[in-house]
Amino acid sequence: MTSSSLILLILGVITLIYGPKAVQYQMRITNRWKVYWRLVNQSKAALRNGDQQLSQQLRNLSKGHLAKVLQMQRRRRLVTAFSMLLLGGLYGAMNAMGLIAL
């Protein structure tokens, strides 16, 4: 096995590993956003019903969820950039080996 084939194989394996993980991570972020908005809406409903203590507790919970979602989105951007770099490397390696014709 030549070194270029080995590099191509390694890049392909890494792409296969990180691709599905990025999709799963995006689904977790989407679910977190749903929980955040549900908490915000419940807090507003509690405030309309005159229960300020419950509203404050729900607001504090929603702030924690918002911080976590924003942290997860920052991490997702790094994972996406890394995945795009890997795909670019994979494409470049395949192009250099003559497997892809432009």
Image (tube, rainbow, N blue to C red):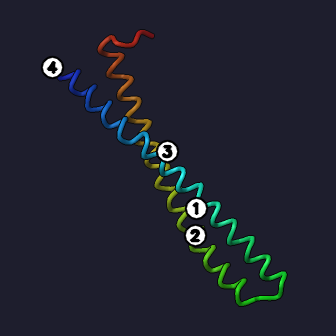
- Where 72 falls versus 18 (above or below)? below
- Where 98 falls versus 93 (above or below)? above
Local crowd size for mark 2, using a 10 Å CA cut-off: few (<14), some (14–19), many (≥20): some
- Where 12 falls versus 18 (above or below)? above
Give me the C-alpha separation between circle 1 and circle 2.
7 Å
Residue 1 placement, left or right of 11: left
Splitting the image into 4 quarters, where does residue 37 fall? Answer: bottom right
At x 78% / y 76%, what residue is drawn? 44
| Element assignment for label 1 | helix
Q: In the rendered structure, are the residues bearing label 3 and label 2 in contact, judged by CB atoms less than 8 Å apart? A: no
Q: Please give the label number shown on residue 32.
A: 1
Residue 8 in the image, given as x and y percentages of width and height: 28, 25
Residue 84 in the image, given as x and y percentages of width and height: 44, 36
Q: Could you tell which of marks 2 and 4 lies nearer the N-terminus?
A: 4
Residue 77 in the image, given as x and y percentages of width and height: 49, 49
| Element assignment for label 2 | helix
| Element assignment for label 3 | helix
Q: Please give the label number shown on residue 87.
A: none
Q: Could you tell which of marks 1 and 4 lies nearer the N-terminus?
A: 4
Q: Could you tell which of marks 1 and 2 lies nearer the N-terminus?
A: 1
Splitting the image into 4 quarters, where does residue 52 fall? Answer: bottom right
| Element assignment for label 4 | loop
Identify which amino acid the numbered label 3 is placed on. Val
Identify which amino acid the numbered label 1 is placed on. Arg
Q: Could you tell which of marks 3 and 4 lies nearer the N-terminus?
A: 4
Give me the C-alpha separation between circle 2 and circle 4.
49 Å
Q: In the rendered structure, are the residues bearing label 1 and label 4 in contact, judged by CB atoms less than 8 Å apart? A: no
Which quarter of the figure is the N terminus placed in? top left
Residue extending farthest to the left is: 1
At x 61% / y 74%, what residue is drawn? 63
Q: Please give the label number shown on residue 23.
A: 3
